[in-house]
């Protein structure tokens, strides 16, 4: 059955209503400014996270090159890689979550800080490798670096 058409005798029928005026679109909210202090705090957090991993690597690298201990850096390498992967995941997840939440200052800090720490690790390794003279007494026991050391021979 078809619905009855409204008539002017129906007390609830008011006729066609005018179209509502269109509202202008709301302007997008400006994101909060990025504050240097908050970015610095985030960088500091990430750099502090680098201390265990980078410190372990640099100390082990130093003792391996100059004192031939430990005999192999394999275990140290594995631990440092695991530390760096965990730190990278933590910095990306925490930094990304903070950026998406709207705190761009602290959110960008860990991302920048992880990169700064990784660069510092590479530079530190290069400085240790080329700055301190090697222990010539360890030249016979360190199979990796013994070819580059000249051990004085006794006649």
Image (spheres, rainbow, N blue to C red):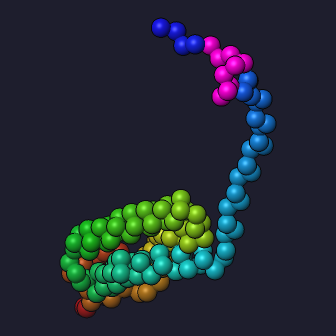
144, 148: nearer the viewer: 144
The percent coordinates of residue 124 (x first, y second) are: 46, 78
Q: Which residues are magenta?
A: 5-13
Q: Quadrant of the C terminus?
A: bottom left
90, 13: nearer the viewer: 13
69, 101: nearer the viewer: 101
Q: Is residue 77 visible?
A: no
- Position of 112 relative to 149 (above/below): above
Tell whether 32 sits left or right of 128.
Answer: right
Q: Residue furthest top?
A: 1
- Specify the principal SS of the magenta part: loop
- Position of 80 relative to 151 (above/below): above
Q: Residue at x 73, y 49 (%)?
A: 26
Q: Is residue 55 magenta?
A: no
48, 7: nearer the viewer: 7
Q: Quadrant of residue 70?
A: bottom left
């Amino acid at each position: 059955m078809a619905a009855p058409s409204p008539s002017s005798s129906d007390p609830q029928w008011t006729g066609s209503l005018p179209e509502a005026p269109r509202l202008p679109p709301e302007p997008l909210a400006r994101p909060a400014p990025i504050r240097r202090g908050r970015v610095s705090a985030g960088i500091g957090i990430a750099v502090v996270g680098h201390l265990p991993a980078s410190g372990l690597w640099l100390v082990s690298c130093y003792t391996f090159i100059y004192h031939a201990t430990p005999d192999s850096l394999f275990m140290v390498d594995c631990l440092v890689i695991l530390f760096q992967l965990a730190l990278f995941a933590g910095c990306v997840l925490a930094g990304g979550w903070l950026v998406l939440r709207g705190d761009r200052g602290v959110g960008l800090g860990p991302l920048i800080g992880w990169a700064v720490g990784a660069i510092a690790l590479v530079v530190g390794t290069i400085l240790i490798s080329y700055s301190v003279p090697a222990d010539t007494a360890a030249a016979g026991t360190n199979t990796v670096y013994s070819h580059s050391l000249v051990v004085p021979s006794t006649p």
